[in-house]
Amino acid sequence: MNILLTGGTGLIGQALCKRWLEQGHRLWVWSRSPHEVPKRCGSAVTGVGELSALDQIPLDAVVNLAGAPIADRPWTKSRRLLLWNSRVKLTEQLVTWLSTKEHKPNVLISGSAVGWYGNGGERELNEGDAPITNDFASQLCIAWEESAVVAEQLGIRVALVRTGLVLAPHGGFLQRLKPLFALGLGGRQGNGRQWMPWIHIDDQIALIDFLLRQTDVAGPYNACAPHPERNADFAKAYARSLGRPAFLPVPALALKVGLGELSGLILGGQKAQPSRLLAAGFTFRFDTLDAALADLRNA
Ligand SMILES: NC(=O)c1ccc[n+]([C@@H]2O[C@H](COP(=O)([O-])OP(=O)(O)OC[C@H]3O[C@@H](n4cnc5c(N)ncnc54)[C@H](OP(=O)(O)O)[C@@H]3O)[C@@H](O)[C@H]2O)c1
């Protein structure tokens, strides 16, 4: 297949490129740094700085993962604008360009996050549920999804990937936690009761590949393992996998003062279930956190 990725140079995108190159697909990555693309994604992947470079290429699929990192720094006004433009505006630009293409792709697989639901507390969240709270992350995901769904009007199948915390051997969420936990300075955040939906990177790649191949699937999919963990249990399991204790909690007040509204991402959570993926026949290779962490420790 001919596949265009946005965000192809990121954590998930690079792993997808590796998988799809092995399967013989032809890949293009729309990037702010097109010259870096072959180095990051594989020498056979073509980087493009402008979508117009692909006007004459018949694409079979588009995978839209671009977005400035959401948890890296507090959400000042300018940061919110960057987070918004790099997802919502970029997706609008992508879909507008698709509308001009004579040969339209069959499918658009577009990014989102479990943050779409807001802070779900103890409620089990399935794709049929409405957002619980109306915070910035939720508004961002809702607008991001809405801008992608417009492609349905072009006759394109649209699948939305509401991703949980992606656990990978290098990069992503664990890379940020590791320095503290490796020193035995890790612990729960706030009261530790908030739910953390997580997913092993191999399952994230497998499910995007599944959504590409299953021609009858569309709409939102919770991309998280069937067994989310509470924050305190996650901290204990991660520390155990590193052979370290996890005694040092981070108080909620410190997170609120240091991070402002961004602290809501950490102190809130979602007890999300991948109901629609399971119903569609997708099987998770890593459905317990201990199994995922054991695999990542050995990677
Ligand atoms: N990883 C997770 O745990 C997780 C969880 C939930 C949702 N997600 C979402 O899934 C998507 C992919 O995740 P990821 O972890 O692979 O992301 P990532 O490693 O942070 O990569 C995202 C890509 O987005 C592009 N990008 C960054 N800032 C941008 C900006 N200001 N304007 C336009 N493009 C920008 C970059 O591509 P170029 O530099 O090539 O332009 C980058 O490679 C993200 O949108 C993320 O929000 C991820």
Image (spheres, grey):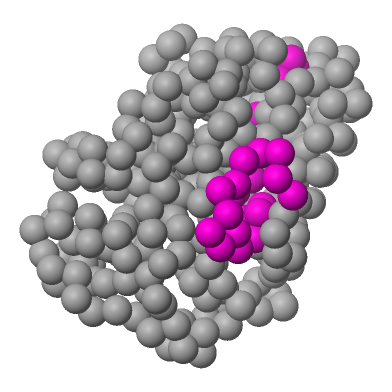
Judge from the rendering whether residue 210 lies leftward or rightward of residue 286; answer left or right: right
Name which residue lies at 29% across and 60% down.
233
Work out whether 248 lies above or below 280.
Answer: below
Left or right of 264? Residue 166 is: left
**Count of all numbered marks drawn on residues in the image:** 0
Does 77 lie within the magenta span? no
Residue 29 x %, y %:
58, 33
Compared across the picture, whether 182 is left or right of 34 comes to left
Q: Quick check: is 108 in the magenta stretch?
A: yes
**Residue 284 pos. (x, y %):** 39, 27
| Residue 188, visible in the rendered structure | yes
Tell me which residue sits at (74%, 65%) in the image.
134
Q: Nearer the viewer, residue 94 or 290?
A: 290
Determine the image quadrant of residue 186.
bottom left
Q: Give the x, y percent position of residue 51.
A: 74, 34
Between residue 33 and residue 121, name the one nearer to us. 121
- The N terminus is located in which quarter? top right
Q: Tell me what residue is drawn at x 52 percent, y 24 percent.
A: 278
Looking at the rendering, the stretch of residues picked out in magenta corresponds to 105-130
